[in-house]
Amino acid sequence: MVDGSDATFLEGLCRRGARRLRRVNFRRKYATIWSLDSGDTVLNLQGVCCGVPASIRDTFAVIARGAGKDMAAYREAAMHMHQWPVPEPALRSARIAHQRLKR
């Protein structure tokens, strides 16, 4: 398994070209797979993403590189992420917890 610490993950993404990133947060109770915050400098990831394979890290790097959402590279990366078989039980339980918090 790949080291999934926040700092190691961030370092790997920066080596892949995501130089604007300053922080990566893994959140076990996060209801979505990823989001970018703070001017695209903070990448929030669902906790199940901490041990993703290199191809998925490459995809996160494209997303975090600052490619606009209307650019083909971003759209292809997002489609690749949505096709990745995220461990459903973990994501489902995070979404349930998220819904409970919203009530």
Image (tube, rainbow, N blue to C red):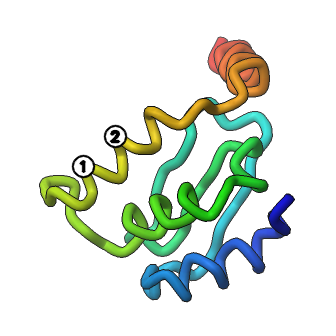
Residue type, numbered disc 2: Met
Please indicate whether residue 81 sits to the left or right of residue 22 in the image: left
Point out the image quarter for the N terminus: bottom right
Q: Against 28, is 92 above or below?
A: above
Residue holding disc 2: 79
- Identify the secondary structure beneath mark 2: helix
Residue at 60 percent of width and 55 percent of height:
44
Say whether marks 1 and 2 touch (CB < 8 Å): yes
Q: Against 28, is 15 above or below?
A: below
The reply to whether residue 101 is in sight is no
User: Badge 2 local density, few (<14 within 10 Å), some, or many (20+)?
Assistant: few
- Determine the image quadrant of residue 63: bottom left
Please indicate whether residue 62 sits to the left or right of residue 49 in the image: left
Point out the image quarter for the C terminus: top right
Q: Against 74, is 87 above or below?
A: above
Q: Against 95, is 55 above or below?
A: below
- Identify the secondary structure beneath mark 1: helix
Mark carried by residue 75: 1
Mark carried by residue 49: none
Q: Position of residue 15 (x, y in %)?
A: 55, 88
Q: Position of residue 93 (x, y in %)?
A: 77, 18
Residue at 69 percent of width and 53 percent of height:
52
Residue type, numbered disc 1: Arg
Q: Position of residue 64 (x, y in %)?
A: 42, 68
- Determine the image quadrant of residue 101: top right
